[in-house]
């Protein structure tokens, strides 16, 4: 059933840091997921459009330039308006500029509607276990 699970990956906003997304996408494919890779500098509207077109189960975004909070204001609401209320939203990376406590980022992004928030040093296998668990809860695995 994993190969029927559709995961969208990409780097949000004007962030050009694509290596993390490429690694994530490859690891997801190797784990048996169907990955739609959007690449770098992806506008939020593109994530939504592709999620609608592919009937995606999850959107996994990365951001390393520290401006994701600004890029993602209203994103969850846009997803809901587009009928994507059942799509899991994950984000990871360097989510804020300057030194800060990751727990603060986690709180901010959960308030923005993300299901999971990961620091740049997150363990991918642990994140994949979270994804599998969340997909099972939604009855998609």
Image: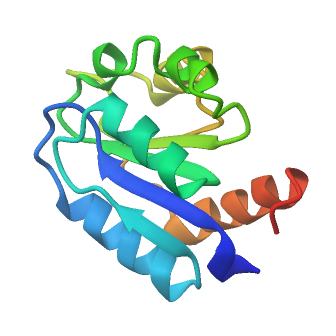
Q: Quadrant of residue 103?
A: top right
Classify residue 61 as left or right of residue 77: left
The residue at 34%/45% (across/down) is: 62
Q: Is residue 13 above or below residue 104?
A: below
Q: How many marks?
A: 0
- In this view of the protein, can residue 58 be seen by the observer? yes
Classify residue 38 as left or right of residue 106: left
**Quadrant location of the N terminus in the rendered image:** bottom right
- In this view of the protein, can residue 118 be seen by the observer? no
Q: Quadrant of residue 125?
A: bottom right
| Residue 2 percent location from the top left of the image | 70, 78
The residue at 27%/68% (across/down) is: 22
The residue at 77%/58% (across/down) is: 135
| Residue 57 percent location from the top left of the image | 64, 54
Q: Is residue 83 above or below residue 24?
A: above
Classify residue 69 as left or right of residue 127: left
**Quadrant location of the C terminus in the rendered image:** bottom right
Classify residue 6 as left or right of residue 136: left
| Residue 49 percent location from the top left of the image | 41, 40
Quick one: 21 or 139, which is closer to the camera?
Answer: 139
């Amino acid at each position: 059933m994993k190969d029927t699970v559709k995961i969208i990956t990409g780097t949000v906003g004007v962030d050009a840091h694509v290596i993390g997304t490429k690694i994530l996408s490859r690891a997801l494919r190797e784990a048996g997921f169907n990955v739609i890779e959007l690449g770098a500098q992806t506008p939020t509207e593109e994530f939504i459009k592709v999620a609608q077109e592919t009937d995606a189960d999850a959107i996994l975004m990365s951001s390393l330039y520290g401006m994701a909070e600004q890029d993602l204001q209203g994103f969850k609401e846009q997803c809901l308006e587009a009928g994507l209320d059942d799509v899991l939203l994950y984000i990871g990376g360097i989510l804020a500029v300057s030194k800060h406590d990751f727990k603060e980022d986690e709180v901010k992004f959960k308030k923005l509607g993300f299901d999971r928030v990961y620091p740049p040093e997150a363990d991918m296998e642990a994140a994949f276990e979270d994804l599998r668990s969340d997909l099972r809860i939604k009855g998609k695995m």
